[in-house]
Image: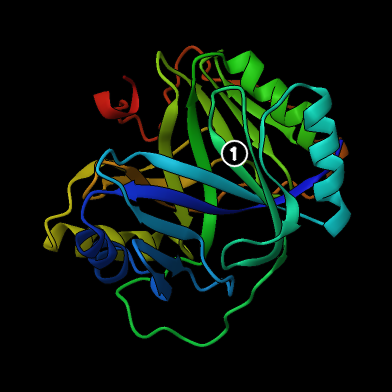
């Protein structure tokens, strides 16, 4: 087993590349790092080459999720481990075939989701101009799975994720570093993307983002509110292709592994929002 160290990127299929690029830069607050045929690479202020890839795709949906590993030979060890488990490796470990890292590999997880592991991040430190708010980093991704037990065991057994919490037996939160969850799974009838969360500095920044997006006519789904699992503040929105994106802050950092005990949420009198806003259909169905 290897240890994944960080969630680094998501790749989203979009029907209109110009429209979606405008949303993620002018409305959401990301910056363009690089452009390629039918692809735009977008970054946060974290300094990584990109946290979001936008790819022209008439069918939309999430194309890929990417994680970082701590050493170059982790990729070779991961490929060997996955091959023994009968997992399809679509790109063998080797020099990266796209911007953002020095080496990479890709495989299919149990939900037939394309996953990239990479090593040797490419850094981009120059500022990218003013925005209403600028996301600090890609904070977490929540994926829909048809078999929540299979999904969460796969990532624990192969990549060293640890359980942080559950929402009943409907949702599991996993960590690969001190952040309460960088990956979570929610049980659904069909696998796919649930949402992608970007970290802002504090509630003031979330409030600024909510107001700005409202002025721009961006549909808000849920929030502001505060989750029980993770304790994070949140507000959810639709992007132009109906991907759900989240502004979040104040998420728990688990610095002492031995002191953390996973909890099953919610208790009898609680909802996924401690401020008592019930989850809307988009976050339930």
Query: Compared to 153, does 11 lie above or below?
Result: below
Structural crowding at the residue carrying mark 1, measured as other residues with C-alpha within 10 Å and reported as few (<14), some (14–19) or many (≥20): many
Determine whether 10 is above or below 265 in the image: below
Residue 36 point in image, percent of width and height: 40, 69
| Colouring chosen for the image of the structure | rainbow
Residue ID at (37%, 86%): 129
Q: Quadrant of the C terminus?
A: top left
**Residue occupying image coordinates x 30% and y 47%:** 57
The local secondary structure at tag 1 comes to: strand
Q: Is residue 133 left or right of residue 202?
A: left
Q: Is residue 139 left or right of residue 25?
A: right
Residue placed most toward the observer, 165 or 123: 123
Res 118 seen here: no
Question: Residue 135's image quarter?
Answer: bottom left
- Residue beneath the point at 44% across and 43% down: 63
Is residue 72 toward the left or the right of residue 20 in the image?
right
Q: Position of residue 29 (x, y in %)?
A: 35, 69
Image spot of residue 269 (x, y percent): 45, 16
Q: Nearer the viewer, residue 239 or 267?
A: 239
**Where does label 1 land, which residue?**
183
Place residue 81 in its image quadrant.
top right
Asked if residue 101 can be seen in this view, the reply is yes
Residue drawn at 85 percent across, 36 percent down: 80
Quadrant (top left, top right, bottom left, bottom right) of the N terminus: top right
Q: Position of residue 272 (x, y in %)?
A: 43, 27
159 vs 149: above or below: below
């Amino acid at each position: 087993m290897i240890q994944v160290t960080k969630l680094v990127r998501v790749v989203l299929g979009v029907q209109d590349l110009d429209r979606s690029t405008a949303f993620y830069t002018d409305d959401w607050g990301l910056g363009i790092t690089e452009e390629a045929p039918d692809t735009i690479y977008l970054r946060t202020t974290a300094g990584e080459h990109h946290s979001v890839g936008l790819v022209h795709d008439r069918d939309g949906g999430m194309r890929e999720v990417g994680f970082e590993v701590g050493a170059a030979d982790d990729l070779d060890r991961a490929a060997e481990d996955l091959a023994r488990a009968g997992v399809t490796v679509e790109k063998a470990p080797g020099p990266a075939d796209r911007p953002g890292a020095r080496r990479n590999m890709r495989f299919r997880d149990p939900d037939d989701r394309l996953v990239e592991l990479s090593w040797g991040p490419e850094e981009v430190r120059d500022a990218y101009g003013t925005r209403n708010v600028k996301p600090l980093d890609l904070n977490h991704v929540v994926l829909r799975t048809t078999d929540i037990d299979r999904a969460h065991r796969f990532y624990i057994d192969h990549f060293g994720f640890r359980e942080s919490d559950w929402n009943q037996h409907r949702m599991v939160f996993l960590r690969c570093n001190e952040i309460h969850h960088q990956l979570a799974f929610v049980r659904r009838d069909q696998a796919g993307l649930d949402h992608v969360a970007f970290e802002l500095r504090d509630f003031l920044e979330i409030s600024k983002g909510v107001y700005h997006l409202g002025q721009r006519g961006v549909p808000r789904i849920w929030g502001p509110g505060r989750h029980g699992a993770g304790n994070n503040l949140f507000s959810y929105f639709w992007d132009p292709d109906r991907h759900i994106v989240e502004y979040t802050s104040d998420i728990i950092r688990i610095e002492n592994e031995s002191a953390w005990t996973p909890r099953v949420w919610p208790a009898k009198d609680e909802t996924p929002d401690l401020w008592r806003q019930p989850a809307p259909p988009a976050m339930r169905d």
